[in-house]
Image: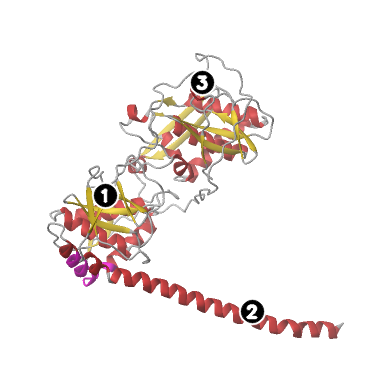
């Protein structure tokens, strides 16, 4: 036996040594690859001024798209006042692209960076949604008329003045505060605008462009009919925002004040090599608490049929989200802003469905969402289209169909463990659930599974009851996990 063990050990030892050698070789290869990537990215940025210094190419701007052209119901229908319809016998088969969204993982809340010591001559502070943040002191290069040569000269000036270190410091602030890419852009814009209050719009935008590009974003500067603009590549589709297409990629247009650029017309920007690493597209998802919270708290109580849910939201955070860019509904459902609030909601509702069958529990939750919220369209309440992140339902006095659908889908998924779809009808959003129990009513078949309509905006309706206006209409399935 000893001989067998000894021989086996001898046979294994060369394999171990070979594995270690392979591992070392892989690590060396990976290191070289990453160094090559970093050097390539750096070389593009180092040569950026040369691209800016060329004749800028003309592009056509496209009008921002509407998420849904059909208006929503002004008042939600009530099952008591709508004509009864027989249950649907057919279950249409619905298919959607197989590409599924990636779930969002909450990150640890961050503490806002607030200056507690006197600032040095090299430091300045600026306001960001009510918080005072630190940043290195910056000098804004003069850019007049947005001429390519002037923009290129400003870029070269920033390269020689240590402004890249400023970009690294701001990138560190983004990590510390837990900001996503959208709020990183807003932070850079506010920092530049406050430090360069008398500079021209072109000068400010040129500095914003330099900082954001060196923070790793795929962003370009453009002449938008004589006005300076930034062009952002974005991972998600953005609605109600003008855009242009460069090499098959959408770039959304933002003016110096972050507002919408004029519709239509021509824009001019420099050309970059197609195969160059141009930076990361902006990710609009929220992945955890925003670190500039700390303002006053807003308390909300939802009640119906003996069920009560209470929650507190940070007012400053809610105001940061008030004008958040419009996205597809699943992106709001995928995002996580306050994991503690969400957990509290589940804990308060869980005892009320304990011991119930899944269909009875789903009905109880459905009726709660239908009645606990007051209804208003976004146009009536806000004057513009605004879908809510789940936490925003506890801030505003009213909500509409997509907000209720997101809320109900979250409850069903996390309290009942069932597959639930967000689904879109023309002018309306609701949900559909794959029950393990046999259920009758309106629904559809997706990937061999039957999904039953559950509408949080059809007041008084139970699972399987579809609004009369949408009976016979095949919905668009929107996956969110």
Q: Give the extent of the magenta segment.
A: 152-164
Give residue 383's position: percent from left, percent from top: 30, 31
Q: Nearer the viewer, residue 316 or 245?
A: 245
Task: Give the Cα distance between marks 2 and 1.
Answer: 55 Å
Residue under label 3? 468
Residue under label 2? 19
Mark 2 or 1 closer to N-term? 2
Magenta span: helix, strand or loop, mainly?
helix
Q: Nearer the viewer, residue 321 or 348?
A: 321
Q: Are marks 3 and 2 in contact (CB under 8 Å)?
A: no
Give residue 226's position: percent from left, percent from top: 16, 51
- Determine which quarter of the picture holds residue 398: top left
Q: Looking at the figure, which quarter contains the C terminus?
A: top right
Mark 3 or 1 closer to N-term? 1
Q: Is residue 161 magenta?
A: yes
Which of pointers 2 and 1 indicates the residue nearer the eye?
1
Residue under label 1? 60
Task: Give the Cα distance between marks 3 and 1.
Answer: 42 Å
């Amino acid at each position: 036996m000893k001989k067998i063990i000894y021989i086996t050990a001898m046979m294994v030892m060369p394999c171990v040594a070979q594995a270690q050698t392979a591992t070392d070789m892989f690590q060396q290869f990976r290191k070289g690859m990453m160094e090559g990537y970093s050097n390539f990215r750096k070389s593009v940025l180092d040569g950026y001024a040369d691209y800016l210094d060329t004749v800028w190419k003309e592009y056509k701007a496209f009008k921002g798209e509407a998420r849904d052209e059909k208006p929503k119901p002004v008042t939600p229908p009530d099952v008591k006042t709508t004509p009864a319809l027989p249950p649907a016998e057919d279950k249409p088969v619905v298919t959607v692209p197989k590409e599924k969204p990636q779930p969002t993982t909450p990150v640890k809340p961050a503490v806002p960076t607030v200056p507690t010591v006197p600032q040095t001559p090299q430091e300045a502070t600026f306001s960001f949604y009510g918080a005072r943040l630190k940043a290195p002191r910056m000098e804004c290069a003069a850019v007049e008329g947005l001429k390519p040569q002037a923009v290129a000269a400003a870029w070269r000036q920033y390269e020689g003045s240590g402004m890249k270190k400023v970009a690294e410091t701001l990138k560190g602030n983004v990590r510390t505060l837990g900001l996503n890419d959208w709020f990183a852009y807003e932070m850079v814009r506010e920092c530049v605008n406050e430090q360069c209050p008398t500079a021209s719009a072109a000068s400010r935008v040129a500095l914003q462009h330099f900082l954001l590009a060196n923070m790793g974003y795929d962003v370009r500067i453009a002449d938008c009919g004589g006005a300076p603009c930034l062009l952002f590549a974005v991972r998600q589709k953005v609605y109600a925002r003008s855009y242009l297409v460069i090499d098959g990629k959408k770039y959304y247009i933002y003016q110096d004040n972050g507002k919408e650029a004029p519709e239509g017309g021509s824009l001019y920007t420099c050309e970059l090599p197609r195969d160059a690493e141009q930076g990361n597209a902006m990710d609009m998802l929220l992945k955890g608490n925003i670190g500039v919270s700390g303002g006053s708290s807003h308390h909300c109580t939802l009640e119906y049929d003996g069920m009560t849910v209470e929650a507190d939201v940070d007012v400053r955070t809610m105001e940061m989200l008030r004008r958040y860019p419009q996205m597809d509904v699943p992106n709001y459902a995928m995002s996580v802003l306050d994991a503690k609030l969400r957990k509290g909601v589940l804990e308060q509702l869980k005892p009320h469905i304990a011991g119930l069958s899944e269909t009875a529990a789903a009905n109880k939750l459905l009726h709660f969402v239908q009645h606990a919220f007051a209804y208003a369209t976004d146009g009536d309440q806000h004057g513009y289209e605004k879908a809510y992140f789940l936490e925003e339902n506890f801030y505003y006095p009213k909500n509409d169909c997509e907000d209720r659908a997101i809320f109900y889908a979250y409850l069903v998924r996390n309290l009942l463990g069932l597959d639930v779809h967000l689904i879109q009808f023309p002018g309306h959003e609701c949900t559909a659930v794959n029950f393990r129990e046999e259920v009758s009513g309106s629904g559809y078949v997706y990937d061999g599974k039957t999904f039953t309509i559950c509408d949080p905006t059809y007041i008084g309706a139970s699972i399987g009851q579809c609004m009369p206006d949408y009976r016979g209409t095949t919905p668009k399935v929107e996956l969110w996990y």
